[in-house]
Amino acid sequence: MKKIGLGVVALVAMVTLAACGAKDKEAGNAKEDKVITVAGQAAPMTDVVKVAAEVAKKDGWEIKLVQVNDNVAYNDMVASKEADASFAQHVPFMEKYNSEKAANLVAIQPIYDAKVGFYSKDYQSVDEIPENSKVAIPNDASNEGRALAILAEQGLITLTEGVGTNATTKDVIENPKNLEWLAVDLLNLAEAYSEPGVSLVYNYPTYISKIGLKPTDALFLEENIDDRFSIQLVAREDNKDSEKIKALHKYMTSDEVRNFLEEEHSDTLVPSF
């Protein structure tokens, strides 16, 4: 009887330890579930995530920013579930990625509209742009169409009716100055500004700031803003309704983030929430 009693005690002890271990594991998992990983590429997007992270701390959430160096890696991270979300792009760019990679990224919330347009080192008005000038535009389809639409707003070209921001250079049906298209990766457009013979360079505030310019230095800016080009919080189809993404949405659209955008970046963007 004594041996049986000891066996029962040992069994109870083992069950108790196992239960404690399970509780510790659950506690660890609960803590892990409060970490939201967000991939980004450049300021001010990365700065917005940092502001949201400070707000999230008050509720026990940790927003972890992973900064990458190109315009593909942040989408790859979300698509492969290395990150819960990204904040770096607009809807047309996301849709292009989905199409090319058979991915299921989804836009969650527009955060701001960047002030985009064309810059010129040599000319002070549209009328001064000479014939046969080189015009540097993005080499990705989503941003190419937007750039061409802005040139059409200024009367420099005429596009196929109804094509709008979905235009390609093949949709240019009138080009009175015989502008020559120089297709450049978005991240390298700022360098094209100093290239000989380049009269106009399209760019975002984020990238043109590399050479000390801002939207007020642009020769002309986009007049009719298409809200599809708002910089978006992006997640996946399978996690868009998760608690993490709901929490992230809350902090990314907080008063603190809005105040940051309005007070620190009013010359380059407009909040869109």
Image (spheres, helix red, strand yellow):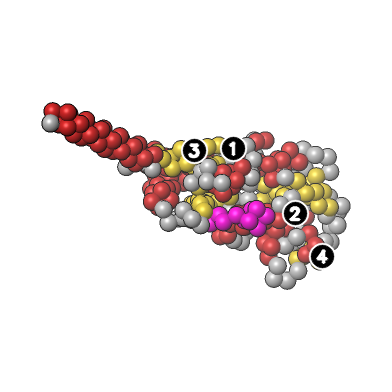
Residue 104 locus on image (x, y percent): 57, 56
Chain part drawn in magenta: 96-106
Density class for disc 2 (Cα within 10 Å; few <14, some 14-19, many ≥20) is some
Q: Distance between the residues labelled 4 and 2?
A: 16 Å
Inspect this view and state whether residue 138 appears: yes
Q: Count up the numbered dots.
A: 4
Report the residue at 84% width, 43% height from top: 197
Nearer-N-terminus badge (1/4)? 1
| Disc 2 to disc 1: CB gap under 8 Å | no
**Which one is closest to the eye, mark 2 or mark 1?**
1
Q: Name the residue under label 3.
A: 65
100 is within the stretch colored magenta:
yes
Q: Distance between the residues labelled 4 and 3?
A: 45 Å
- Foreground: 113 or 13? 13
Q: In this view, does 90 lie to the left or right of 7?
A: right
Q: Is residue 149 left or right of residue 110?
A: right
Kind of element beneath mark 3: strand
Res 192 quadrant in image: top right
- Residue 174 vertical placement versus 106 (above, below): below
Q: Name the residue under label 4.
A: 174
Q: Mark 2 points at which residue?
A: 126
Q: Name the residue under label 1.
A: 68
Nearer-N-terminus badge (2/1)? 1
Q: Residue reaching furthest bottom?
A: 161
Q: Is residue 214 left or right of residue 135?
A: left
Report the residue at 67% width, 62% height from top: 165
